Amino acid sequence: MKTLSIDFGSANSLAACTDDQGNIILIRHDGQSASNSDTKHLPSFLAFHPDGSVRSIGQEAKSLAVTHPKEVVWGFKRLLGLPYTYLKEQGELDRFTYDILPDWHDGQCRCAVGKNYTPVELVSIILQKLKKDAEEQAGAPFDSVVLTAPAYFDSSRNSRLKEAARMAGFDRILILAEPVAAAIARNMTIDSSRQITLTCDLGAGTLDISLGMIFRSDDGEVRYETLINTGNTSCGGIDIDYRISRYILDQLTLKEVPADSRGELLQLAEEAKITLSREQEVCLPVDIGGEGRSVTITRDDLTHTCKELLDSFRSQVLAALDQAGYSPDKVDTLILIGGPIILPIFRDLLGDIFSGNARVLRQLDAFYREKEQGMVNRMTATAIGGAMYHTYVSDRCPFGYGFEEIVIRDEEIEYKPEILIPMNAVYPHPGGALQVRYSNGMGLYEFKLIKQVPLAGSASCEYKFVSILKFAVKNAFFTNIVCEMSMNENKELVVRIRNLSRPDESVEYIGADIDPSSEITVQYPIRAKRPKNIQYKAMEVIPPEESTLNGFTEWVVNTLMLSVISSAKENKKPIDRVEPVMKEVISESKRQPVRYQQLFNQAGCLLHNSYSLGMLDPGTKYTLECDLNDWQDQLFTCSFT
């Protein structure tokens, strides 16, 4: 089985693999030269016909972005796995020239270009193109992929990338942090001494900072151990272009740009950015708003315009060093990756941070004089590192994960975070368990999954509510429930909820935060009056009527299961990964009397995991989820005495 390495970027994508002799080759596209010295990047641009069918991919699509701004999509990596409301509140949607609409099925967004596409579907089209070109060049199929992703992507966004790779036809998918891949690719003599390496990856869409150690072990293998990953998923070349475009409008005394000129304006901004990487100033001929004028932009103007981005860059670098307990003078090697990083404004910033480190200053001088021999190539390192993934890598997750814990004190109830996977944990991580120390009397529990997010420039953090997982038990007063959480080797959360009093009552979720409707910041602790159903007073669980049980069982077997099977066939997805759950569903449905609590658990698990694995589309998942919630209201009721 051949493995393809893909560096999927917001602006450009690159694929690499090894040949039969173990040499790394870059995949070319659409008539590109076979010489490895030439660029092999595929622009991450898609052009569409008015009916929504794909018109072109790559360079041809990018060339249409100026004349057809509403029919060419780009930068959609920035939209991946994020709720529409969050993107709108952060001003992200203002950066794009095409229409972006809310997806009412899952709270995400859809790109409207003749028809509506999810970001996952758009990513999959790019990945399919890279896979097809690689197979034509190598003369062999690629079923396995190492897909690089920003180190600061969370479990939800990594899961979306995996879903896109599955849609593109890959069976085995590994996620590798982009700056870690770049560090692996470094072309330097590595011995047994541990070299402290700081990688700054500034791409079109994101900023990633990774601090780690690289060395050669006793067995001769090169090893990389990550110490800290930090970053900002809203700091990249797209943001620089946007700020330059706003500067141009300010010089023209225009508040807004006509819709048909937005593509032209962004192209001018990109040209200005590229020119300012070589020259002290640029003079742009601008014909927007019906008046032809010229606008001059200097490097000082660029520094002032991008001050917020530069401050974020500085804070992320210093945060990585501070959290690992190192000062800038302790860094042995600085690796710079990405297109925008070549701008002198970042050279000046890094020169200031490392002013006392002669080693790094020499590396900076060589890099910005573009004498990168013996150094990492900033444009190809990530894809090449993915192709070298046999190197031992120890990576870390920048976020913490856990549950909201409930503590009862007399007539008061307190909600507080219980973190089971700490921030900066090495993955795979065994995680931990939360013991549920209360009974809600109804037999249906809801567990709130939360994410712990570090705050750059400080030792503190904030907590965000991610999603709710449900669990039902047969006897509400005979429970000993534990919630176990771990993280697998592919940066996916694995959650298992069990009733230790009844071994047959358990459920497992993989990629448990894959479908967050939003990420809401929560200020803990929260104190409130004890809810009526969480108390010592007597209550009576009202069992559902037989007709309700029969209807629910019929829905699970004839609607839920058949929907999963038919959708899996339609999407060409094997069902083997959910077969164990389906067998349990069938077994539970045949029991007399029906254990509706466990059947409810397994139905929820089947629904969630099928969607997580790409078997269900968002619309079908939403409809089935609404149905399951309706059944929940009919199955779980109680009265108080």
Image (spheres, grey):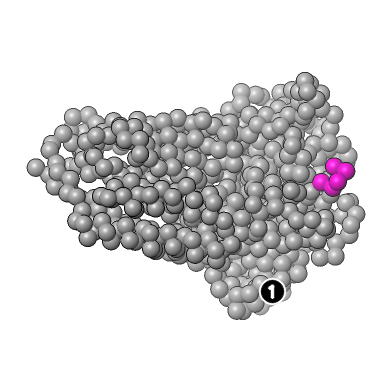
Q: Residue at x 58, y 31 (%)?
A: 426
Name the quadrant of the C terminus.
top left
Regarding mark 1 in the picture, which secondary structure is present there? Answer: strand
- The image position of residue 52, as x and y in percent, is 60, 75
Q: Nearer the viewer, residue 641 or 144?
A: 144
Crowding around mark 1 (Cα neighbors within 10 Å: few <14, some 14 to 19, many 20+) is some
The answer to whether residue 414 shows anywhere in this view is no
| Range covered by the magenta-colored residues | 18-22
Q: Amino acid at mark 1?
A: Arg
- The image position of residue 478, as x and y in percent, is 24, 34
Res. 241 image quadrant: bottom right
Q: Residue at x 61, y 72 (%)?
A: 70
- The image position of residue 569, as x and y in percent, is 54, 63
Q: Residue at x 90, y 54 (%)?
A: 35
- The image position of residue 445, as x and y in percent, is 30, 43
Magenta highlight: main SS: loop
Residue 59 belongs to magenta span: no
The residue pinned by badge 1 equals 55
